[in-house]
Image (spheres, rainbow, N blue to C red):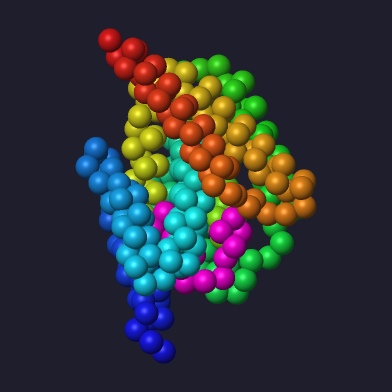
C-alpha cells in the first residue's frame, strides 16, 4: 500500500479523534460562549484546504471530498435544527445532544464501511414526521420554543437517520466520504448549544424553526416518494443552506430589535 493510499485512513483516525475529543469536552458541561464558534469554524475553513491539498496529487479525490463535505454539512445544519427543537428544556439535554451526535458519527462509520441501504421509505417517513413536528411547532402560541421533554429521546434515532441520509447523499463507501462527514460534524454540539441559547432572545423563534422544519420535511418526503434516498447535488445543498441561513438572519434581526 502506497503512502498516498494510507492518507485517507490516517485522516479518518485524526478526524475521529478530533470529533471524539470535542464530544467529550462538550459533555463535561460548560456554559456556551462565542468562542465555541471557533471549532465549527475551523472545520469549515479546513474543508477547502483539504480539497486543495488533495487536488495536488489526486484531483478526483478532491472533487469527491468537497462534494461530500458540502452535502454532509447541509445535513449537519438540519441535525442542529432538529436537536435544538427536540432537546429544548429536556432533562439532561446536554448529555442527550452529545449522545445523539455520537450516534450519528457511529451510523456514518457503519454505513460507509458496509454500504448504503435503500432509504426511500425511511426518507419519506422521516419527512412526514418532521412536517407533523413543524405544524405542532407553528401552532405553539407562546414565545420561545416549547418544552419537548416527551419526545426528546427521539433525538438519537433522528440523528442516526440523518447520518444515514448524509452518507446516502454522498454516495457512501469510501474513506474520503467518511472524512468529509466527520469534518462536517466537528463542533455540531457547540452549534446546538449556541443556537439554543440564542433562542431565548427571539420572541417568535418557533415560527422560524417551523419554516426550516417544513423545508427539511418536504425535502425528505419528496426524495423518498421519488423512490430513492435523499441524494443531493450542489444546487440542493446550496438551497438548503441558503434557506436555513435566511431564517437565522431574520431571527437575529428580530432578536436585535427585541433587545432595544
Query: Is residue 100 visible to the viewer in this orientation of the structure?
Result: no
Most frequent secondary structure within the magenta stretch: helix
- Is residue 7 found left or right of 222 in the rendered image? left
Q: Quadrant of residue 107?
A: bottom right
Question: Where does the image place residue 70, in percent across and percent down from the top left?
Answer: 47, 51
Indicate the quadrant where residue 10 lies. bottom left
Residue sticking out furthest to the top: 260
Would you place residue 23 above or below residue 189 in this image?
below
Tell how many labels: 0
The residue lying at 56 percent from left, 59 percent from top is: 170
Farthest left residue in view: 35
Q: Residue at x 63, y 52 (%)?
A: 231
Residue drawn at the location 42% of the way across and 22% of the way down: 251
Q: Which of 30 and 158 is in front in this view?
A: 158
- Front residue (pair 205, 174): 174
Q: Is residue 10 visible?
A: yes
Towards the viewer: 39 or 138: 39
Horizontal side, residue 112 vs residue 27: left or right: right
At 54% across and 47% down in the image, what residue appears?
234
| Quadrant where the N terminus is found in the figure | bottom left
Residue 259 screen position, x and y as percent: 30, 14
Residue 23 drawn in magenta: no
Segment colored magenta: 168-184
Amino acid at each position: 500500500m502506497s503512502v498516498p493510499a494510507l492518507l485517507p485512513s490516517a485522516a479518518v483516525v485524526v478526524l475521529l479523534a478530533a470529533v471524539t475529543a470535542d464530544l467529550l469536552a462538550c459533555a463535561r458541561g460548560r456554559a456556551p460562549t462565542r468562542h465555541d464558534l471557533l471549532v465549527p469554524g475551523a472545520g469549515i475553513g479546513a474543508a477547502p484546504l483539504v480539497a486543495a491539498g488533495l487536488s495536488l496529487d489526486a484531483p478526483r479525490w478532491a472533487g469527491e471530498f468537497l462534494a461530500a463535505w458540502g452535502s454532509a454539512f447541509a445535513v449537519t445544519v438540519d441535525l442542529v435544527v432538529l436537536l435544538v427543537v427536540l432537546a429544548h428544556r429536556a432533562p439532561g439535554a446536554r448529555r442527550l445532544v452529545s449522545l445523539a451526535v455520537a450516534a450519528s458519527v457511529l451510523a456514518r462509520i457503519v454505513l460507509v464501511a458496509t454500504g448504503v441501504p435503500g432509504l426511500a421509505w425511511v426518507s419519506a417517513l422521516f419527512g412526514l414526521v418532521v412536517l407533523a413536528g413543524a405544524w405542532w411547532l407553528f401552532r405553539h402560541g407562546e414565545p420561545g420554543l416549547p418544552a419537548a421533554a416527551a419526545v426528546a429521546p427521539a433525538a438519537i434515532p433522528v440523528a442516526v437517520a440523518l447520518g444515514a441520509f448524509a452518507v446516502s447523499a454522498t454516495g457512501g463507501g469510501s474513506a474520503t466520504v467518511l472524512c468529509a462527514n466527520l469534518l462536517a460534524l466537528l463542533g455540531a454540539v457547540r452549534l446546538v448549544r449556541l443556537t439554543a441559547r440564542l433562542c431565548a432572545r427571539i420572541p417568535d423563534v418557533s415560527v422560524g424553526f417551523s419554516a426550516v422544519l417544513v423545508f427539511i420535511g418536504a425535502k425528505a418526503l419528496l426524495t423518498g416518494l421519488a423512490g430513492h434516498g435523499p441524494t443531493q447535488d450542489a444546487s440542493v445543498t446550496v438551497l438548503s443552506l441558503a434557506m436555513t441561513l435566511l431564517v437565522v438572519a431574520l431571527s437575529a434581526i428580530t432578536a436585535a430589535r427585541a433587545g432595544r
